[in-house]
Image: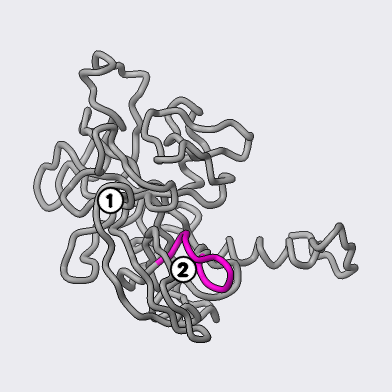
């Protein structure tokens, strides 16, 4: 890796700050969620799926995404694969026992024909633009167009950080497969074994509004992931500076706080 010891400022952005951002991206994996319809089983954990209703495109094989559902953060944490080889998020139990993450699978815990798959943004970046979730812009600058869209139609991501939202019932909210802001389809796992206080934690993206703030403590209205346009929020107090509550720290994906009263809040959902 090239290390820049000479600071060269371009406006407010320096070579050092860009290098630091790169380091933070190297210690986490960001996922973008998509609806998934099982099309083909290639093995116990390997399969291919469509991101939309297959009857709408006459079961077009060109729209299939092939993935190995065993290439997960838990596998990387167990040293079964490298973190660079993580392609999908685990299926896990979140707060309150709700099922989160990837729920499609040939064998988990039984055959699931429909569900959600949270794909690593590096994996999505390698897909053809037509297969990328709408709103995800790849490193090639080409936005995705698979038909799953945010309520504002925005693209919101640069290929290193994506977005995703699961409604907790095995599918995405909304008649088009998704309702809400793009970051509501996003989750992030910070790799264990680093000095980051968030190491080993998983956070899920929510739309949230700050109702009251006292220093870093805030009373916020939080919407379920993918449901900010069609349901009521839950109100809670939390510390926006605590990694035990939310993605808080350098290069955080949480955007609310200070002068930003409505935006992304990545709440802790589980740990590896």
Task: Tally the marks.
Answer: 2
Q: Residue furthest top?
A: 58
Q: Is residue 55 left or right of residue 29?
A: left
Magenta span: 256-266
The local secondary structure at tag 1 comes to: loop
Q: Residue at x 25, y 18 (%)?
A: 56
In the picture, the disc for residue 10 is none
Q: Is residue 72 above or below residue 79?
A: above
Please tell me which of labels 1 and 2 falls first in the chain.
1
Q: Is residue 20 left or right of residue 11?
A: left
In the picture, the disc for residue 190 is 2
Horizontal and vertical percent position of residue 2: 79, 60
Q: Residue at x 31, y 50 (%)?
A: 226
Q: Dot 2: within a 10 Å radius of its alpha carbon, few (fewer than 14), some, or many (20 or more) residues?
A: many
Q: Residue at x 24, y 67 (%)?
A: 94
Q: Residue at x 25, y 43 (%)?
A: 172
Q: Is residue 44 above or below residue 77?
A: above
Q: Is residue 24 above or below residue 151?
A: below
Residue at numbered disc 1: 166
Horizontal and vertical percent position of residue 107: 14, 46
């Amino acid at each position: 890796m090239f290390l820049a010891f000479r600071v060269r400022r371009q406006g407010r952005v320096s070579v050092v700050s860009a290098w630091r951002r790169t380091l933070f991206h190297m210690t986490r994996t960001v996922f973008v969620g998509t609806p998934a319809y099982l099309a083909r089983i290639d093995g116990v954990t390997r399969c291919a799926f469509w991101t939309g209703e297959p009857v709408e495109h006459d079961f077009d094989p060109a729209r299939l995404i092939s993935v190995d559902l065993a290439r997960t953060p838990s596998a990387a944490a167990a040293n079964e694969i490298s973190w660079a080889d993580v392609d999908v998020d685990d299926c896990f139990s979140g707060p309150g026992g709700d099922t989160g993450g990837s729920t499609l699978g040939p064998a988990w815990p039984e055959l699931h024909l429909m569900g959600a798959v949270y794909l690593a943004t590096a994996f999505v970046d390698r897909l053809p633009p037509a297969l990328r979730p709408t709103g995800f812009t790849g490193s090639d600058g080409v936005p995705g167009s698979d038909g799953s869209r945010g309520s504002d139609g925005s693209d919101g991501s640069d290929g290193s950080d994506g977005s995703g939202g699961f409604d907790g019932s095995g599918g995405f909210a909304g008649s088009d497969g998704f309702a809400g802001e793009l970051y509501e389809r996003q989750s992030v796992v910070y790799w264990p074994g680093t000095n980051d206080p968030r190491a080993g934690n998983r956070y899920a993206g929510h739309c949230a509004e700050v109702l009251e703030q006292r220093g870093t403590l805030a009373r916020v209205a939080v919407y379920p992931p993918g449901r900010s346009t069609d349901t009521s929020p839950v109100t809670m107090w939390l510390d926006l500076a605590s990694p035990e509550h939310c993605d808080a720290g350098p290069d955080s994906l949480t955007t609310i706080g200070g002068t930003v009263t409505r935006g992304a809040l990545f709440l802790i959902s589980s740990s590896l």
